[in-house]
Image: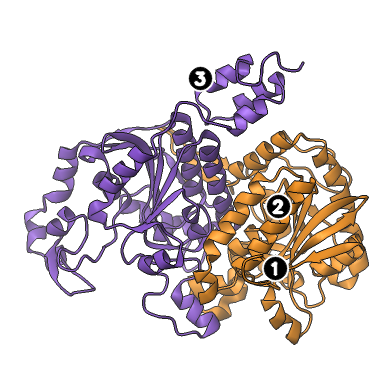
């Protein structure tokens, strides 16, 4: 059941038992700043380079169009492919227009509507994740933010087509995971994936929003660590200095991974692909099992503290 | 995967819980004041009323095992997987190291924030998974995710309804992105129920927020909520800080969420066991799971179907064997 055919510089899933998270505080903070760099390529920058023929689709067919998520269908290496991405803004005005890539339920409903199109056409789905989290607002709550995220996960779990989720910037909270259920979850070299944004964590755990750097360090959300934990299946390299230095080169590197991986995934029968996708998410996690006597067994990733009990 | 079953007898629980020591009887801490109506009650009296204020109906928090006892026939249930305990994959330290927090929580009695059991309600067998807010805010880490998925798979395999009672602040921060991934794991658990055609019943207790509301708890087949429970992805405080909106006092409350269309009914705790039993009676399952993924797969070819069937732990042994033999609808002859 191990993925095969991801050759070259892309590392394969291996057993990750016993690997301790690494990176000192300074390195982790640097990765977070690169992941959020103002010049970093956003979904539309990649789409423009990967598929010049792209039709953006708008609206959740219910009440509006959430600009924090872009979605559409394009021609990619000779076949239709659906792309859904979380889009930040370049300047102040666009950032507000995009709501800082924090979508409400309408964004996820738009995503699901376009996923249904993909399933109908047999077109693979690629998601590009880059959000500080789902939007926290009264209207979003009333319109079912929680249910929209859950249903989006469920929809992705059930898709019959090959799916790849790419964390291209910062992937934070359920807002990111809503688009993160795929056959392969990969991270760009300088991207991060975490349960919450550093600012959010600082406010909750340290009760001080200024402790963001400290929180970021504690979460160790780098691509290398996520790979070690089995959260990411591969790490896609970025150009020297980071993706923001050369959008074309960043897109080429991503293109290499995506085209190769889609070929691998297309070789797997749909039903089996779905089962493998489920098993992938069924496995992730780390816990101890207390035996009736002797030392604890550690299941999943761990840092080698298994003797603690 | 050793499973330890704990038989809990009513007498033992009664003896354990309802007989205060003479010293405790004298302590004012045995009294509880209702935050809503300020009435004072003895703990024992409150417990007998299922932790609901006898005067105003305010619903107090209920621990995981206490909830199981409240719901199960005669207070008897078989607890599952108590051997699963939190690990510290991130070596996480905030104001204190994560293992210290876990030890402190375990010292209070619960083994984790989710307690699972085989039980009967109104004579009907079911698998129940109950969150315990007293254990690190009911937060969902790897153990909660693992137990939840196992509970769903067990209900699917036995073809009995799956019931979950939530009370959680969301994903467990101290397990970082691995805690986030447990949201996905709960969705996988629900997929096992969907395949087997087994219903999921969600009871939302106070509070159900963050990643727990944004995963399994918002997509149950039937969703009840306890009166006054806060049900939200982002809580009112976070929203007020983020958007500077002033929110109404009942924002995100169960009664409001009924109006918003996110729950099916607000159910008083004193009626909960009866309502669940009645609902299970309505939902009683037919013999075969119609149109399950396993059967669809079986129709694609016998050899692969057999392999797939063996990989589906939640299928009943009977169905699994039938598929393996090629003895299933549409599998006649099979393809080589």
Res A137 visible: no
Colour displayed for chain A in the image of the structure = orange
Question: Picture coordinates of residue A248 (x, y %)?
Answer: 93, 66
**Residues at marks 1 and 2 touching, judged by CB atoms closer than 8 Å:** no
- How many marks the image carries: the answer is 3
The part of the image, by quadrant, that contains residue A282 is: top right
Q: Quadrant for the N terminus of chain A, please.
A: top right
| Residue density around tag 3, few if under 14, some if 14–19, many if 20 or more, within 10 Å | few
Q: Which SS class for mark 1?
A: loop
Query: Which residue does the numbered mark 1 point to in the structure image?
Result: A59
Colour displayed for chain B in the image of the structure = purple
| Residue density around tag 2, few if under 14, some if 14–19, many if 20 or more, within 10 Å | some
- Report in which chain the residue with disc 3 lies: B
Query: Which residue does the numbered mark 2 point to in the structure image?
Result: A116
Question: Picture coordinates of residue A128 (x, y %)?
Answer: 75, 61
- In the depicted view, which residue is nearer to us: B26 or B150? B150
- Report in which chain the residue with disc 2 lies: A
Closer to the N terminus: mark 1 or mark 2?
1
Q: What residue is shown at x 34% (from left), y 32% (from top)?
A: B5
- In the depicted view, which residue is nearer to us: A248 or A114? A114
Query: Which residue does the numbered mark 3 point to in the structure image?
Result: B318
């Amino acid at each position: 059941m191990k993925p095969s055919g991801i050759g070259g510089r892309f590392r394969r899933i291996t057993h990750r038992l016993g690997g301790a998270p690494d990176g000192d505080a300074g390195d982790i903070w640097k990765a977070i700043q690169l992941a959020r760099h103002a010049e970093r390529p956003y979904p539309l920058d990649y789409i423009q380079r990967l598929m010049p023929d792209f039709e953006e689709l708008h609206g959740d067919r219910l009440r509006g169009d959430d600009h924090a998520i872009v979605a559409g269908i394009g021609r990619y290496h000779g076949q239709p492919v659906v792309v859904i991405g979380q889009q930040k803004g370049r300047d102040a005005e666009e950032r507000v227009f995009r709501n800082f890539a924090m979508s409400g339920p309408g964004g996820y409903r738009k995503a699901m509507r376009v996923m249904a199109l993909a399933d109908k056409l047999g077109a693979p789905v690629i998601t590009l994740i880059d959000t500080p989290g789902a939007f926290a607002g009264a209207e979003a709550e009333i319109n079912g933010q929680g249910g929209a995220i859950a249903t989006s996960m469920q929809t992705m779990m059930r898709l019959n087509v090959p799916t790849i989720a790419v964390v291209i910037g910062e992937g934070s909270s359920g807002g990111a995971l809503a688009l993160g259920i795929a056959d392969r979850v990969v991270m760009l070299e300088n991207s991060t994936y975490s349960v919450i944004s550093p600012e959010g964590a600082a406010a909750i755990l340290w009760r001080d929003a200024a402790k963001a750097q400290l929180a970021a360090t504690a979460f160790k959300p780098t691509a290398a660590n996520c790979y070690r934990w089995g959260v990411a299946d591969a790490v896609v390299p970025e150009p020297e200095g980071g993706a923001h230095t050369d959008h074309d080169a960043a897109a080429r590197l991503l293109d290499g991974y995506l085209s190769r991986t889609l070929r691998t995934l297309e070789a797997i029968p749909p039903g089996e692909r779905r089962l493998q996708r489920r098993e992938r998410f069924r496995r992730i996690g780390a816990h101890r099992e207390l035996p009736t006597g002797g030392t604890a067994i550690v299941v999943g990733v761990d840092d080698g503290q298994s003797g603690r009990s | 995967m050793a499973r330890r079953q704990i038989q809990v007898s009513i007498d033992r629980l009664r003896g354990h819980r309802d007989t205060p020591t003479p010293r405790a009887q004298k302590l004012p801490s045995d009294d509880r004041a209702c935050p809503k109506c300020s009435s004072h009650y003895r703990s024992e009296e409150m417990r007998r009323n299922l932790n609901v204020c006898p005067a105003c109906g305010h619903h107090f928090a209920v621990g995981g095992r206490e909830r199981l006892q409240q719901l199960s026939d005669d207070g008897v249930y078989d607890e599952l997987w108590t051997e699963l305990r939190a690990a510290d994959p991130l070596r996480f330290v905030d104001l204190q190291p994560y293992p210290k927090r876990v030890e402190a929580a375990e010292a209070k009695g619960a083994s984790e924030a989710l307690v699972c059991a085989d039980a009967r309600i109104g004579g009907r067998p079911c698998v129940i998974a109950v969150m315990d807010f007293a254990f690190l805010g009911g937060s969902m880490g790897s153990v909660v995710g693992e137990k939840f998925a196992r509970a769903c798979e067990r209900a699917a395999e036995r073809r009995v309804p799956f019931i979950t009672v939530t009370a959680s602040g969301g994903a467990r921060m101290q397990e970082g992105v691995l805690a986030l991934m447990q949201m996905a794991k709960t969705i996988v658990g629900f997929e096992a129920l969907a395949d087997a055609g087994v219903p999921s019943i969600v009871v939302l207790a106070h509070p159900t927020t963050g990643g727990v509301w944004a995963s399994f708890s918002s997509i149950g087949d039937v969703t009840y909520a306890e009166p006054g429970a806060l049900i939200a992805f982002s809580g009112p405080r976070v929203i007020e800080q983020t958007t500077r909106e002033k929110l109404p006092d009942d924002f995100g409350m169960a009664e409001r969420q009924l109006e918003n269309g996110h729950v099916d009914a607000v159910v008083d705790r004193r009626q909960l066991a009866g309502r669940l039993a009645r609902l299970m009676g309505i939902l009683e399952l037919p013999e075969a799971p119609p149109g399950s993924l396993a059967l669809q797969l079986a129709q694609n070819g016998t050899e692969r179907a057999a392999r797939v069937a063996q990989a589906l732990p939640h299928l009943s042994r009977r169905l699994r064997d039938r598929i393996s033999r090629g003895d299933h609808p549409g599998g006649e002859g099979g393809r080589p």
